[in-house]
Each structure stands twice: as C-alpha cells, then as structure tokens.
Amino acid sequence: MGKAYKVYRVDYTTKMEIPIGTVTERRNKPRGAESHFGLMKLARQMFAQSPEDQARIVVGEEQVA
C-alpha cells in the first residue's frame, strides 16, 4: 500500500486548513522535495470545485498509519 497524504482547503481569511480528503501515492521510490508538485497537481484535479478553488488546495504531511 502507498503512502497517504492529507489534502486541505485553505481559508485565507481565517488562516485555517480544512481537511477534505487524502491522496494515496503509489510510487515505489520516495519523492524528492521538489516532486511534491505532481502530488499537489493530482490533489487539485481531484478536489477543486472551480478554477479559483485550485489555488486553495494544499497537500499536507505524510500520514503515519
């Protein structure tokens, strides 16, 4: 099973991160720090409700099971 990352929608007026789901990574090798952009792009495709909402979607730290 892959690693799970929590996905948040950020409310910039209150500075709160609201959890909206998870993204599971299926790679065998660990991602580098700069490779998290691909994971964020996937999360934005899955969870954004509008083009403006895409900027509010962020991926959090890896969840420990």
Image (cartoon, helix red, strand yellow):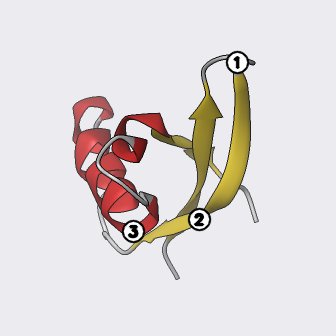
Tag 3, which secondary structure? helix
Q: Do the residues labelled 2 and 1 touch (CB within 8 Å)?
A: no
* Furthest residue in direction bottom, as rendered: 1
Q: SS for tag 1?
A: loop
Q: Which of 35 and 19 is in front in this view?
A: 19
Say if mark 2 contacts mark 3, CB within 8 Å.
no
Q: Earlier in the sequence, mark 2 or mark 3?
A: 2
Residue count near mark 3 (Cα–Cα under 10 Å), binned few <14, some 14–19, many ≥20: some
Amino acid identity at mark 2: Thr
Q: Is mark 2 on a helix, strand or loop?
A: strand
Q: How crowded is mark 1: few (under 14 residues within 10 Å), some or many (20 or more)?
A: few
Q: Disc 1 residue type?
A: Lys
Q: Residue 22 carries which label?
A: 2
| Residue 2 place in picture, x, y as percent | 48, 74
Q: In this view, does 27 lie above or below 61?
A: below
Residue 31 appears left or right of 62: left
- Marks 2 and 3, how far apart at CA: 10 Å
Q: Where is residue 28 in the image (x, y as percent from the top left)?
A: 32, 70
Which-is-in-front pick, marks 2 and 1?
Answer: 1
Distance from label 3 to label 1 (Cα)?
A: 22 Å
Q: Residue 46 carries which label?
A: 3
Q: Name the residue under label 1.
A: 15
- Residue at figure coordinates x 59%, y 43% from the top left: 9
